Image: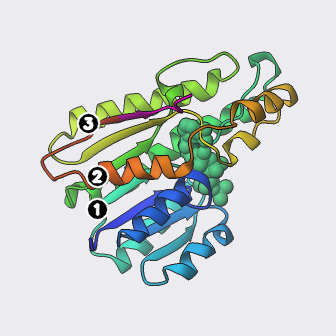
Amino acid sequence: MPSKTVVITGASSGIGKSISKALLNKGYHVIGMARRKERMEELSNAFPDQFTALEADITDADAVLQARELILSKYDEINGLINNAGIGFLGPLEDAPLSQWHTMVDVNLKGLLTVTHTFLPSLLAAKGHIINIDSVAGHEVYPESVVYCSTKWAVKALSMGIEKELRGRVKMTNISPGPVETEFSTHTTHERKAEQMKDYFKNVLKAEDISNAVVFALESPQHVAINELTLRPFK
Ligand SMILES: NC(=O)c1ccc[n+]([C@@H]2O[C@H](COP(=O)([O-])OP(=O)(O)OC[C@H]3O[C@@H](n4cnc5c(N)ncnc54)[C@H](OP(=O)(O)O)[C@@H]3O)[C@@H](O)[C@H]2O)c1
């Protein structure tokens, strides 16, 4: 059983919850961060000795710093960081509230940067592993998903940059899922787009497909770095 410690953002639902479960079942110590702490209770109850639920909004740099202090008071090192928290408000450019564009940048990019900046010294000290949950939207640009795609392209650029600059010092894996059945598609408020997404998100990937990929990347031998994985529904 590995005694490694992994921090994951967005552990309260969907892909993040599934990754947390998979790592807990493999014996990792997992620190889940999300705003809805109550949604992490199931994991806290099932894995009281391995799972720590921290209520933290990743757009709040002080809250992320506090989370790090708490984690370091409990664990000697942090071996992995999974940047998973993210949000997508899809719809036509000209109908979008500016606040939704700003929220996507604040969470998907600035929040991810805040968490990465905060935990990087510990990850470097442990020769650890960063896994960014990007998207196929970070490889292509879709109409009516333009700003979401912009944030995910930025995540890919960051992953590529970290890989090049910190190669040999920290492992970097960028995981790019296509559509996955989670709460993700329910955040869109544009009525026509939300309706369209209901259909589009039928018979797609499951959160477990992504957590399997995370475990595969995380458990690769020390001399192997899996830098990019793309998963799409086969249909
Ligand atoms: N589902 C898909 O089709 C799909 C495809 C490709 C990539 N992705 C990416 O996968 C990641 C996970 O999404 P999901 O599909 O699992 O969606 P989800 O079920 O909506 O989960 C999103 C997670 O992000 C957290 N989060 C959102 N804003 C946050 C904030 N300000 N601070 C802390 N945590 C925050 C949420 O927790 P709280 O609300 O409790 O804070 C939740 O745990 C995202 O980065 C998404 O872009 C999803």
Label 2 – label 1 distance at C-alpha: 6 Å
**Quadrant showing the C terminus:** top right
Q: Which residue is identified by label 2?
A: 129
Q: Is residue 9 above or below residue 176?
A: below
Mark 2 touches mark 1? (CB < 8 Å): yes
Q: Which residue is mark 1?
A: 79
Q: Residue at x 48, y 63 (%)?
A: 20
Magenta-drawn stretch contains 231? yes
Of the image marks 2 and 3, the number of the one nearer the N terminus: 2
State the SS at label 2: strand
Marks 3/1 in contact by CB < 8 Å: the verdict is no
Give residue 151's position: percent from left, percent from top: 54, 30
- How far from the left and from the top, in percent, is residue 70? 44, 74
Please report contact status of discs 2 and 3: CB closer than 8 Å, yes or no.
no
Q: Amino acid at mark 3?
A: Glu
Give the residue drawn at x 66%, y 23%.
Answer: 145
Distance in Å between CA atoms under marks 3 and 1:
16 Å
Residue interval drawn in magenta = 229-235
Q: Is residue 1 left or right of residue 66?
A: left
Crowding at label 1, few (<14), some or many (≥20) Cα neighbours within 10 Å? Answer: many
Q: Is residue 60 left or right of residue 184?
A: left
* Residue 77, picture quadrant: bottom left
Secondary structure type for disc 1: loop
Q: Amino acid at mark 2?
A: His
Q: Determine if residue 120 is in view.
A: no
Colour style of the rendered protein structure: rainbow
The residue that mark 3 highlights is 163
Q: Quadrant of the N terminus?
A: bottom left
What amino acid is labelled 1 in the image?
Answer: Asn
Specify the quadrant of the image occupied by residue 185: top right
